[in-house]
Image (spheres, helix red, strand yellow):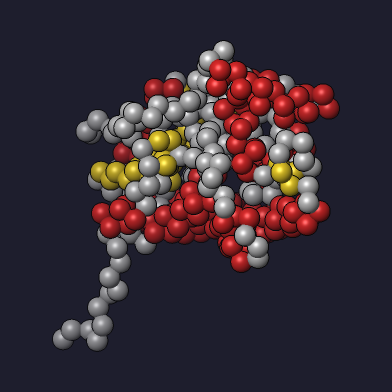
Amino acid sequence: MAPLADYAKLPELEEYGAWFKDFADLYREDGILQVTWKTKDLPMHHSGMSHRAISQLVRMLSMDWKNEIIIFTHLGDSWMIESDPEGWETYSELPTQRFQHQYFDDTNLIKNMVFDLDVPTIGAVPGPGFHWDTAFMSDITIVSEDTWIETPHAHGGLVPGDGMGLMMQHYFGTKRGNYYMMTTRQVTGQQLVDWGMASEVVAKDQVMPRAWEIARMWKKMSYENRCIMSNLAKRPLKNLLMDSLKLHTVSEQYASLLRVAAGDLGDENSAQQDEKYISRTNAWRYTYPYMQQPMTRETWQTFRTAPIEWFKKVERGEEVNPHGHNEDPGYYKPYRPTKA
């Protein structure tokens, strides 16, 4: 006899892949899913839209049990560097839109990686960049030799509460984590391994092959044991997020709204920079290693203005932005592994 109701129909990879095609390239082989973050045909641009899409897609991936192992990476040879200066219009709409972006999206982007995904995950970082949450919330993380990252919020006048500072405290230890969170000093790929936030540092062209090698190695285990193993890997982060995540995210949101109410949210001369102006410093931060040094009051202020002057020189052709995007259609190609 048939049951009264069959299993609910959920979308297949081809369906939800089409829904999120502007934000991620999805490639699956033998149960291993590679998620390559992007914005249309370019490397991912940070925006309210991409911010939301990350958490939504991760939740969707968790409902497709054909995704047995997941690799998270980024289009191009770096992690996220650019922001979409026009991608924040709904972020500033009070109260509902801003509440949804900050109260829901900020938290879901972090917690969905740990609480929704019941399968092994690998972060594969091809180079420097920011908003590296999905890479470092993965069970293991492979970084390139030229990776460097930071938690940049305090430098822009924001409270660093979106989860990145919390991860630094957790992985680096309280004092070291506090220092890097509160001074925005940058961390290199080798330091990330030495201090426990990354698993391996490899040559730049070996990040993706190494991620796939580990994924295929795990495929030698039974499906059930892989999932149980992944739950043990995620357990420390689950405890951390249960205890502290919402406190961190709400602290950033509350402090941000104080600045909005005070009328000093804006450009580099304001107490707090908005996303449109913060985005102008991104490429500069990953072109020059100045922020890998201890910060001072002078450099803190200089690093707010130096990127703007550099950006003007780039526009005049006097400097080169190595992270500038090639606009030719099809220039950026998501990684595809050689067949096992």
Which residue ends up furthest to the left in the rendered image? 1
Residue 57 in view, yes or no: yes
Image spot of residue 300 (x, y percent): 77, 28
Which residue is at the front of the view, 93 or 302?
93
Is 4 positioned to the left or the right of 72 in the image?
A: left
Image spot of residue 204 (x, y percent): 44, 22
Which residue is at the front of the view, 299 or 225?
299
Residue at 24% x, 30% y is 338
* Rendered view: 122 above or below 335: below
Residue at 43% x, 35% y is 43
* Rendered view: 87 above or below 83: below
Say which quadrant the C terminus sits in. top left
* Picture quadrant of residue 216: top left
Which residue ends up furthest to the right in the rendered image? 297
Say which quadrant the N terminus sits in. bottom left
Which residue ends up furthest to the front in the rendered image? 316
Residue at 63% x, 48% y is 163
Image spot of residue 62 (x, y percent): 40, 58
Residue at 77% x, 40% y is 270
Residue 188 in view, yes or no: no
Is 78 positioned to the left or the right of 173 in the image?
A: left
* Rendered view: 166 above or below 340: below
Image spot of residue 266 (x, y percent): 71, 43
* Picture quadrant of residue 91: bottom right
Tell how many labels. 0
